Amino acid sequence: MNNSDKLKQVIEKAVENGFKEVSEVTLEDFFDLSTSYYVEATYALLFNHDFAKAYWGDVGVCMLFGEEASKDGCCVIYDAGKDCSTSSWKYHLQQAVLEEDPLSYYYSKLDNK
């Protein structure tokens, strides 16, 4: 699968979850962009906080393992006595930033691929 197909599926999931805006570029026009701007716009989109919130949701996850944290605070670093949970979108956005190919990271987490 090529990157355009991956990106389309990633955008579709975020839109289904409520994402509506891609700065000055409409979702319909996104794939008609020139190659150089397309790459820049793709990174701007993937690292956009509103896009990440729509894509990943806002449930609590453990910052150490990326697994969903339970409501009773199971994600605690016991030796430090600190809660290490964060919002899922923050955790996954941080992981995407660290990846060589952030789009593939997003795509690898699609529920329906």
Image: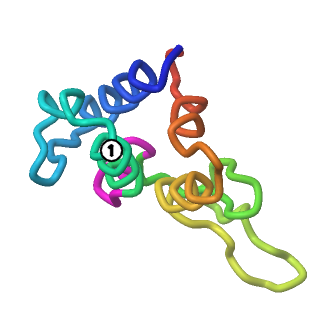
Residue 43 horizontal/vertical position (percent)? 40, 51
Q: Quadrant of residue 70?
A: bottom right
Q: Residue at x 18, y 47 (%)?
A: 22
Give the magenta part as a residue range.
Answer: 48-56
**Residue 64 to residue 14: above or below:** below
Q: Secondary structure at mark 1?
A: helix
**Residue 26 to residue 21: above or below:** above
Magenta span contains residue 55: yes
Q: Residue at x 83, y 85 (%)?
A: 80
The local crowd at label 1, few if under 14, some if 14 to 19, many if 20 or more residues have their Cα within 10 Å, is few
Which residue type carries mark 1?
A: Ser
- Name the residue carrying label 1: 36
**Residue 74 to residue 30: above or below:** below
Residue 45 horizontal/vertical position (percent)? 32, 49
Q: Residue at x 24, y 33 (%)?
A: 15
- The color scheme shown is rainbow
Q: Which secondary structure type mostly characterizes the magenta part of the structure?
A: helix
Q: Residue at x 76, y 54 (%)?
A: 65
